[in-house]
Image: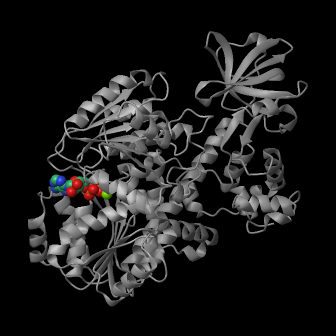
Amino acid sequence: MRLTTSLESVKGVGEKTAEQFAAANLHTVGDLLYFFPRKHEDFSEVTPIGDITPGKRTIKARCESISTRHVRRGMAITTATLADESGKLQAVWFNQAYRTAQFKDPKQEFYFSGEFEFSYNRHQLTNPSAEKVSDMPVQTDRLLPIYPAIKGLKSQLVRKILSELRPLMTMLPDPLPEDIVRTNQLASINDALLGMHFPTNTSEINIARQRLGFDELFYLVLAAQLNKQANAKLEGWHIPFEQTTVQTFVKVLPFELTPAQKQAAWDILQDFEKETPMNRLLQGDVGAGKTVVAGLAARQAASHGFQSAILAPTEILASQHAETLSRLLTPFNVSVALLTGSVKSKARVELLAALKRGDIDIIVGTHALLQPPVQFHKLGFVVIDEQHRFGVEQRQKLLEKSERMPHLLAMTATPIPRSLALTLYGELDVSIIKQKPKNRQPIQTKIWAPTSRKALYETIDSEIATGRQVYIVCKLIDNNPMNDTKSVELEYRNLKNSVFSHRRIGLLHGRMKPAEKESVMKDFAEGKLDILVSTTVVEVGVDVPNATVMLIEDADQYGLSQLHQLRGRVGRSEHKSYCYLLTSDSKKPSQRLREVEKSNDGFYLAEVDLKLRGPGEIYGRAQHGELNLQIASLADAELIVKASKAAQDFIASGASLLQYKELAKQVEYYQRVTTLN
Ligand code: ADP
Ligand code: MG
């Protein structure tokens, strides 16, 4: 048996099981060996119910009775009486109604593991996890690996199949060069795999995680470095720098560029002159003014007969960019066009022909730009706005539309923490716009409990009275009777018919027709609406400087960086702006919300986000899902440094990947996911 052996040939895997594995992207024995537990549940210390004290506890008990009731805001509360020989206690689960069926057999014994605490006036075990005692493997000291769910497969079966593979784990050759394992004091790959799948104590798990996390980061850095080398060998378009083109452009701007914008533009124009294609990431917090920098560069390209393509993640954003750029560039005879899915067939045919003839200098669009009929005359410059929204393959498609590799600028407002930027994007050059334009005042952020809703609406109304505009963001499109989370449609009607009946209100969500979306967005941008009730479709990029209030309903249901992105829709002019985070209940706000309330700094928040998620998500997929890190925590700066150094030493030593077959395969995989071209 080898890593490449198909799972179907493993004992215990039938055709059906193999299909279920395949649906989870697990095809070979190697895939399964590297399919790691989400976490390990420690059932080693069982407390008799009679002796239980508050804290994280495991009990071995039967479920005597269980019932679920549905309460306000669609919450389901399941309570059960659990019993062993020494006593009884109450367990409670929130929104896990399926537990009722799971524990319906009063004779079945389970391990329950959770926090035993005093709440709602009694002691109870809160949201315990549970495993059938009869399912527990015998030899693991009850340190049970919990695998990510695979549709249709019992976790018990996954464990059983892995135990078939155990002998292979013990003799697998190490993919890393021996001296790297030695100098970095890493566990062998064999111990690491056994430690993940069959740990006998927690220290084995930690050692395994160190080793496997190191591997992931090592591959990643090595791949990024190799990409950089490969990129340096490509021939790009030479686009000469011309001072006058820049000067005339800067002159017509309604504002002065910030020093950071000038620097970024300078970086790009310098890259345009080089022999090799640019590969640059333009990072700048929301509202920092990235679009105009891209516009300046596109103008330079156009003046030398090169076309530019600007790829945006949503139609709203694409049409906004097209509008901004044509306003800025039409005076210079630079033609700008918009291509989205909603451009109708006849207009589309004409547009595509013009593009191919070279009559269009800049084309802005959504995914529609990636389709095969879209052909260029001479594509010299590609801008990808909010780059993380596009997959690698999609970017590749666009880049293939040019004879030579075009210059590439990826713009993102997702501040990648400094500690990571180098590792994740080691192949890229990075420009950072740190300062915001001078005219900005800091956004004032405040958490509100739902009980203060009335006062909040009054505050908002007086802001509208001064001529400003307001976003109200809700999580859902439709109203779900089982759920109290605000839906845009309902909220829109409510507000329109009550508190804000005297104001002009618009509705925006992703399921509306593109033309409807565009017209609402246009009305809002032109000040014809006071309030825009929207889903998170406004999250990326939308720019309406007169909007100064962002109200986020059910704010506790969003991630930290998403809140920061949404907040970035306001604070885009000289007017003072406000962000109100409405919580869905009156409980103490989470640390996440408090951090957003405290800080306006996207970089700081990104670091906090990493730390907050860190421990909780230790076993989860890293947030940069595309990178496919299973184990390595991006918060582990020490390991990142160690792995980077090893990768650099490896390259410097002149070692050839050809010698290390398994390593080469891994690196090749990471090369595909990390490259932008
Ligand atoms: P982002 O970096 O989030 O993409 P945008 O490019 O949308 O930001 O710019 C945000 C707003 O700031 C726009 O209305 C833009 O016209 C304006 N802006 C850009 N640069 C400056 C500047 N130097 N001074 C004043 N306003 C600026
Ligand atoms: Mg933008």
Residue 270 falls in image quadrant: bottom left
**Residue at image point 31% right, 75% down:** 337
Q: Can residue 652 be seen in this view?
A: no
- Ligand 2 is located in which of the four quadrants? bottom left
Tell me what residue is drawn at x 50 percent, y 61 percent. Answer: 220
Picture quarter with the C terminus: bottom left
Q: Which of 483 and 45 is in front in this view?
A: 483
Residue 652 in the image, given as x and y percentages of width and height: 43, 69
Q: What residue is at 42 percent from the left and 82 percent from the top?
A: 346
- Compared to residue 501, the image places residue 669 above or below, namely below
Residue at far right of view: 107
Q: Which of 183 and 457 is in front in this view?
A: 457
Where residue 465 sits, quadrant-wise, is top left
Q: Position of residue 539 (x, y in %)?
A: 39, 50
Q: Is residue 333 left or right of residue 478?
A: left
Q: How many marks?
A: 0
